Amino acid sequence: MITLSTAANMETRGEIAIILVDNPPVNAINVEVRKGIMEGLNAVSKDDSVKAVIIACAGRTFLAGADITEFGKEPQHPGLDLIFDLIENYRKPVIAAIHGSALGGGLETAMICHYRVAVPTATFGQPEVNLGLIPGIGGTQRLPRIIGVQKAIEMCAGGKQINAREALENGLIDAISEENLLDGATAFAKKLVHENHPLIKIRDKNDKIEEARNKPEIFAEARKAFARSDRGFDAPQAAIDAIETGVKKGIEVGLKNEREIFRKLIQGSQSAAMRYIFFAERECTKIPGLASDTPRVPVNKIGIVGAGTMGTGIAMSCANAGIPVTIMEINQKLLEKGLETCRENYKNSALKGRITHDEAEKRLSLINGTISLNDFADVDMVVEAVFENKNLKKEIFAKLDKICKDSVILATNTSALNITEIALATKRPESVIGLHFFSPANVMRLLEIVRTEKTADDIIATSISFGKRIKKIPVLVRECHGFVGNRMLFQRVNENKQMLLEGSTPQQIDKVLYDFGFPMGPFAVLDLVGLDVGWDKAASKGETLRDVLCEAGRFGQKTNAGYYDYKPGNRTPIPSQYVQEKINELAAKNNIKQRLISDEEILERSLYSVINEGAKILDEGIAIRPGDIDVIWVNGYGWPRYRGGPMFYADSIGLKKILDKIKAFEKTHGNTWRPSALLEKLVNEGKEFKDLHDRHG
Ligand code: COA
């Protein structure tokens, strides 16, 4: 075994050399990896006894892409382009041996090799779009030449990954190794040598792109589809441009153009925001003060109280991760309704081809039902997901306390109630935690984990591990009304409603926020959720617009009337004359003089109210880091990923500018705009939110 660099070794097996990259955790291609591969290739080219080279990786995966932490820094020699030239023109076969994932620069490295062998579980992708980028070193050029334009667009513009079977069918790999990968790849390499196979350069293959050369509509249609599915994102469109240029003008022009597009994107604001969120989503599970060796409670069986929308969604999230769950309802009829929701959902997923019928059956078989809490005596975790009624929840927790085993985790899915108080209904408040899922819980990735002052460390650590296991992004927060996400949202909702009274309209506010990048405007969302959710008819005094609309039976889409009007069976919001009249009446009643409000003011008041509250939340220690807040807003509240979340966005606008505006709003609109002390401190010290990340290393 020869050491090539700190991240690669080489061994020879007779006439075959194996360059083994070893750069944990994911073999990202940093300078040491590049040095190692180059050293190895240079050494082998001087050694006549070696006839072929395998590039493989140690650890859990093949090369997972360029090292993202090197982006934006001074490039270090040797660049990947030099290595690619070396491999492509190498005089002996170079074979990529792939396990885990070949992603981004990893897949590009595999494609520059003359041949590729993979294990059956390997996956392949160009996920750069998720970082606001396109493949930078040939992915948009070589991939269509191997798998065709349509599939290359799906992978480069859509970030779609494929498995080894599809890769083999499409010619992306040449063989699947069922045995030990290095043994299989070595045997494959020997065969190439002895049968004198040619050194294949993907750049010379054109048959798969011929058809697209005469069909420009492929690109036009793809652009249209991605403009809809990825509205506002630059990278998918750029990936299509890069593929089209290479198809029309040949690979040399294509490679140069791809490089240029990559360079522009990496310097742009979208990629900066998306790379930031990539790391923030990983950092948020590292909890200062929580030892990494904190014991985890094994979670192999889960009980869920309530078979409503949340309960069934949570149950499916668990079953999707292979964890058996039992849902409890108060009677057989409600239970059956909940189980039917799960059945329907899996049936639809299978019909749409998202999972196989077998997989759907398997997952469904993990979900059972009961009408007795006594069946939770042996579960490892209970998630209570009944409607928001404190007394009911306390009653349930008191019962669970008597029924469940000592080591159980008792979680509530409340989105607003006081968890400390609920925990006090038990004799073990240290075992109680909030697991705030977002609807639909089987789809939305955010999981706010709410700890009380009493929650024990092992319960917190286990909840975070559990969140990751069910493929959520868990963010640990402390308790306050609305926790992090909703508390910030309340500020914006209030501000939006206030702006209606001051002279704006639901449609103007919705358009401004939709254009900013939110998937829907706030009033369209309220109509979708239902104005009556949390509305108390008995307590309603017709003092707010919501009261007035609810009293008139305008509950939103379900009644074809809310902040907007709707035609039956059609979800397109239509501005409502009735609502406008009610707004005007309320404004007059409250002596609010109506005026034209500019789009700019709407945007600033909508976003700065959120940012100011976020700063207060940080100051109070409710959220650990600004990045945690951003992860919450990007994954739970529709903040456009390419704008990085409210705290990142605030830095990009400039905290001084934001503080000045907040102070101006305080003068005109009063106390709700009291600036956060932390925001003032940061401005005084010339700092930004990102400087707070360093507090935790
Ligand atoms: N460059 C630098 N660091 C990377 C990285 C990359 N390309 N990919 C992953 N990492 C780091 C993560 O930040 C994380 O670091 P941490 O442990 O300090 O938090 C660590 O590697 C493990 O990553 P994680 O995502 O937690 O592991 P996973 O097993 O869930 O997923 C991958 C592994 C490779 C699928 C996933 O990390 C991924 O998608 N990476 C990005 C791939 C990519 O976009 N490549 C193209 C780059 S242009």
Image (cartoon, helix red, strand yellow):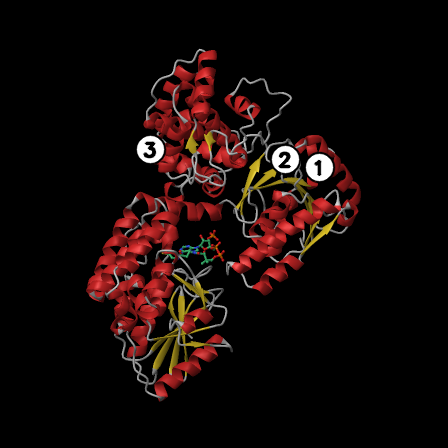
Distance between mark 2 and mark 1 Cα atoms: 9 Å
Can residue 318 be seen in this snapshot? no
Residue under label 3, please give it.
653
For this rendering, which residue is in front, 486 or 113? 486
For this rendering, which residue is in front, 189 or 236? 236
Distance between mark 3 and mark 2 Cα atoms: 34 Å
Tags 2 and 1 touching, CB below 8 Å: yes
Left or right? Give the position of 468 relative to 22.
right
Question: Where ligand 1 lies, by image quadrant?
Answer: bottom left
Amino acid at the residue labelled 3: Ile
Label 1 beta carbon less than 8 Å to ligand 1: no
Which tag, 3 or 2, sits closer to the chain's start?
2
Label 2 beta carbon less than 8 Å to ligand 1: no
Q: Position of residue 267 (x, y in %)?
A: 28, 47
SS of the residue at dot 2?
Answer: loop
SS of the residue at dot 1?
Answer: helix
Identity of the residue furthest to the front in this view: 568
SS of the residue at dot 3?
Answer: helix
Q: Callout 2: few (<14), some (14-19), or many (20+) C-alpha neighbours within 10 Å?
A: many
Residue under label 1, please give it.
429
Above or below 205: residue 565 = above
Q: Callout 1: few (<14), some (14-19), or many (20+) C-alpha neighbours within 10 Å?
A: many
Above or below 523: residue 444 = below
Residue under label 2, please give it.
452
Label 3 beta carbon less than 8 Å to ligand 1: no
Amino acid at the residue labelled 2: Thr
